[in-house]
Image: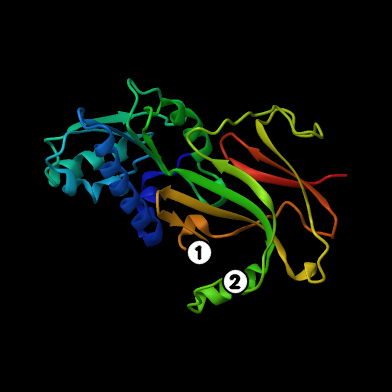
Amino acid sequence: MAINPQAAAHCVNDTGRSVAFIRGVHSAIKALQGRFLDQPLKILYAGCGPFATLIMATLVRFRDDPLELNFLDIHAGSLESVQQLITHFGFGSQTIKLINADASSYQHTDAPHLIIAETMQKALEQEPQVAVTANLGPQLSCAGVFIPEKITVDLGLADLSGETAKVANGGSRIAGPRHWLGTLLELTAGATLVAASESADGKTEGKSLLNLGVFCVPQLENLAQLELALFTHICVFSKYKLRDYESEITLPLKCHDVKALGGGDQLRVSYELGPYPRFCVSHVH
């Protein structure tokens, strides 16, 4: 479910996300120019939104460089806004194409050297980042770069209220220990994702799921004070990364599917695809 242009525009206010991605995109373009010396750099920006935030701020640095820019969005209004920005800032000398299409099914005419696709909420919930990556990743040029390079979602136990309070008070570190149950998903352009039509218990027939395995809750004295949560970490490109609490999309997300936990409990985790993608957690009985 792609968010509307107004909500996409609001994402620019997430300073941590904007800065990390803008720096990552700039660094990736420089790196790719060194790899592809004899040809214009082909860039596909999927889900660009009304501001094309992640590349527009850095285009002034490449005003005289041969770039083929393809801006893709499912909302025609966003593309009209992008066109106005291109005209206003004088980027008309670049080769630019505006594409009104669904990034989760769109097939590009050639292999881009750089694909930018940031269409996500924390814990890969609601927005189609997984579907978009699975569709566009195989279309990337050999030796090309896909941004973000990797998204990792882990399952763990933590004192979320204590962490939130410390961060709100300016703390530079999370409060209290965490107990990791395991990595659920590492999403990259080359990831192979195989969906099943139902989960192992057969109770979700008709839904498309990625079955991610079974994870064990450890025996802990303070288990009652801890919450089961999903933790998102993002490698944008090279050294540019987003960790816990550095962005709205890396805030921990409490798992509401499981109401009570006991030491030794077995938890089955899957990722549901479709109009509202999300992680699903249930007890193994």
Q: Which of marks 2 and 1 is nearer the N terminus?
A: 2
- How dense is the environment of label 2, judged by Cα within 10 Å: few (below 14), some, or many (20 and up)? some
Tell me the element at label 1: loop
Given the image, on which type of amino acid does mark 2 rest?
Glu
| Residue located 20% across and 46% down the image | 59
Of the 4 image quadrants, the one containing the C terminus is: top right
> Can residue 225 be seen at all in this image of the molecule?
yes
Which quarter of the figure has residue 136?
top left
Quick check: 171 left or right of 116?
A: right
Q: Which residue is drawn at 37% across and 32% down?
A: 143
- Residue 217 in the image: state x and y as whole percent: 79, 56
Residue contact between numbered discs 2 and 1, judged by CB atoms under 8 Å: yes
State how far apart marks 2 and 1 are (Cα).
9 Å
At 38% from the left and 27% from the top, the residue drawn is 142
Residue 28 spot, x, y in % from top left: 32, 44
User: Circle 2 sits in a helix, a strand or a loop, which is it?
Assistant: helix
Q: Is the residue marked by circle 1 packed among few (<14), some (14-19), or many (20+) residues within 10 Å? A: many
Label 1 sits on residue: 245
Left or right of 153 on screen, residue 22:
left
Residue furthest right in the image: 285
Which disc number belongs to residue 163? 2
Where 137 falls versus 216 (above or below)? above
Name the residue rendered at 32%, 32% in the picture: 113
The kind of residue on which mark 1 rests is: Tyr
Can residue 51 be seen from the camera position used here? no
Give how far across and how far down residue 231 sits, in percent: 59, 56
Where in the figure is residue 203, as x and y percent of width and height?
A: 79, 34
